[in-house]
Image (tube, rainbow, N blue to C red):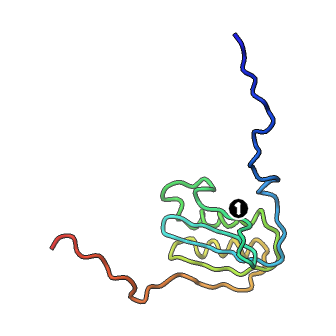
Amino acid sequence: MIKKVIPKFGLRRNRRIGSRKSRRRIPKGVIHVQAGFNNTIVTVTDVQGRVVSSSSAGNCGFRGSRKGTPFAAQTIAIKALDTVVMQRAKVLIKGPGLGRDAALRAIHKSGIRVTLVRDVTPLPHNGCRPPKKRRV
């Protein structure tokens, strides 16, 4: 029986060099919290808008209806801020979900000085025409 030899070099040619989870240092940043009814997503960007770190409920091991809970949002915010070192941040909160306040509380507890908290939930000013009724 002959064993096939697989070369160990050249396997990971197109991968990114360096760990993506290393602690990044930015003086100022923007923390985006998207809190839906079924999920919460926290994204940390620098002032230019480049994503530095992000986390979501599914990413943290929550499944099903637990993804929309305040505890999940708190865990997500802590995990997203673990890989970032920054002094000041703006917080932009979007969505109607339960995780809004919990994520904001976790951001405050992390020691980052919050300079601005803004609600950027899109509101339709009687926007699109609804679809016609299916059965009359």
**Where's residue 69, x and y in %?**
54, 65
Left-right relation of 104 to 40: right
**Where's residue 108, x and y in %?**
72, 76
Q: Residues within 10 Å of mark 1 (few under 14, many from 20)?
A: some
**Where's residue 35, x and y in %?**
55, 71
Relative depth, front residue between 114 and 25: 25
Dividing the picture into quarters, in which one does residue 67 lie?
bottom right
**Where's residue 3, x and y in %?**
72, 17
Relative depth, front residue between 123 and 128: 128
Q: Quadrant of the N terminus?
A: top right
The residue lying at 78 percent from left, 30 percent from top is 7
The furthest residue to the top: 1
Relative depth, front residue between 111 and 59: 59
Q: Quadrant of the C terminus?
A: bottom left
The residue lying at 74 percent from left, 48 percent from top is 14
The amino acid pointed to by label 1 is Lys
The residue lying at 33 percent from left, 82 percent from top is 129
Can you say whether 128 is above or below 37 in the image?
below
Left-right relation of 10 to 105: right
Q: How many marks?
A: 1
Q: Is label 1 in a helix, a strand or a loop?
A: helix
Residue under label 1: 79
Dividing the picture into quarters, in which one does residue 13 lie?
top right
The furthest residue to the bottom: 125
Can you say whether 132 is above or below 69 in the image?
below
